[in-house]
């Protein structure tokens, strides 16, 4: 059977041999693991820039040769020594400027863990802990404002995220946008509120 050729007369093998992968920018891909149990959320304290000493979800870069599910299980174990089960992929976070290092697209996962045993922060996490949290919602026009409170010992920190809907009709999913500063690194406040919504807490 004759091989198919494209408009340049190339077979697929010939096309691939000449393909220049540097022609298009290739974003990095990361994973974040969100575990919420018994009114607590699992967070790490970042041990490196960007977001040094800020709270974040466990996660990291997808290694060559692994898929995003494998990366999520590996990253959770490396940063907390917990084993992830029941992973459920959430909407990717892909805003072009979401990370100051380079173009990074992250795949967040809702997950559970085998137990809530002793945490052991490792890899690039300076600490790992279960943080009690609560939140309140306030309707404002066609939007909803979430104010989330995270308890850390005697102190309580909060952040706000506005949930709205795309009026242009480009996407039907709600849009989550952080309002003001957050104790969480990067766009993790937005990912956290989306997770709260998806879990119907």
Image (cartoon, rainbow, N blue to C red):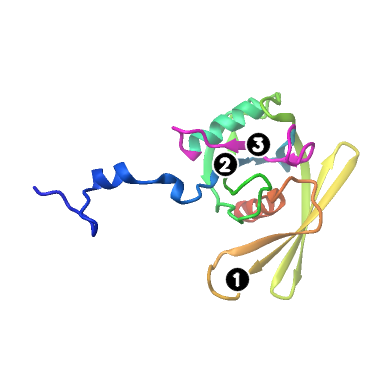
Q: At 45% from the left edge and 46% from the top edge, which residue is drawn?
A: 22
What is the CA distance from the residue labelled 1 to the residue labelled 2? Answer: 26 Å
Q: Quadrant of residue 200?
A: bottom right
Answer above or below: position of 179 versus 34. below
Closer to the chain start, of discs 1 and 2, is 2
Q: Is residue 17 left or right of residue 169?
A: left
Q: What element does badge 1 sit on?
A: loop
What is the CA distance from the residue labelled 2 to the residue labelled 3? Answer: 11 Å
Q: Tell me if I can see residue 85 in this picture.
A: no
Q: At 57% from the left edge and 33% from the top edge, which residue is drawn?
A: 84
Residue at which label 3 appears: 58
The x and y percentages for residue 196 are 66, 52
Pair 1/2: label in front:
2
Q: Is most of the magenta stretch helix, strand or loop?
A: loop
Is 65 included in the stretch rendered in magenta? yes
Q: Which stretch is magenta?
A: 47-68
Residue at which label 1 appears: 166
Q: What element does badge 2 sit on?
A: strand
What is the CA distance from the residue labelled 1 to the residue labelled 3? Answer: 29 Å
The x and y percentages for residue 152 are 84, 38
Q: Is residue 103 left or right of residue 145?
A: left
Residue at which label 2 appears: 30
Q: What element does badge 3 sit on?
A: loop
Pair 2/3: label in front:
2
> Observer-nearest residue: 6 or 121?
6
Q: Quadrant of residue 121?
A: top right
């Amino acid at each position: 059977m004759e091989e198919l050729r494209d408009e340049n007369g190339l077979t697929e093998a010939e096309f691939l041999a000449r393909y220049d992968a540097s022609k298009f920018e290739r974003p990095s891909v990361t994973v974040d693991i969100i575990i919420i149990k018994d009114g607590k959320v699992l967070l790490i304290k970042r041990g490196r820039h960007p977001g040094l000493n800020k709270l974040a979800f466990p996660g990291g870069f997808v290694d060559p040769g692994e898929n995003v599910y494998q990366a999520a299980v590996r990253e959770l174990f490396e940063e907390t020594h917990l084993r992830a089960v029941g992973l459920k992929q959430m909407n990717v976070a892909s805003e072009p400027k979401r990370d100051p290092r380079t173009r990074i697209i992250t795949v967040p996962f809702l997950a559970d863990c085998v137990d809530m045993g002793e945490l052991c922060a490792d890899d690039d996490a300076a600490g790992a802990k279960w943080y009690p949290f609560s939140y309140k919602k306030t309707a404002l026009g066609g939007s909803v404002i979430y104010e989330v409170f995270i308890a850390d010992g005697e102190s309580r920190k909060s952040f706000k995220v506005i949930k709205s809907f795309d009026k242009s009709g480009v996407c039907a999913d709600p849009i989550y946008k952080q309002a003001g500063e957050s104790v969480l690194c990067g766009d993790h406040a937005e990912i956290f509120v989306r997770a709260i919504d998806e879990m119907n807490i």
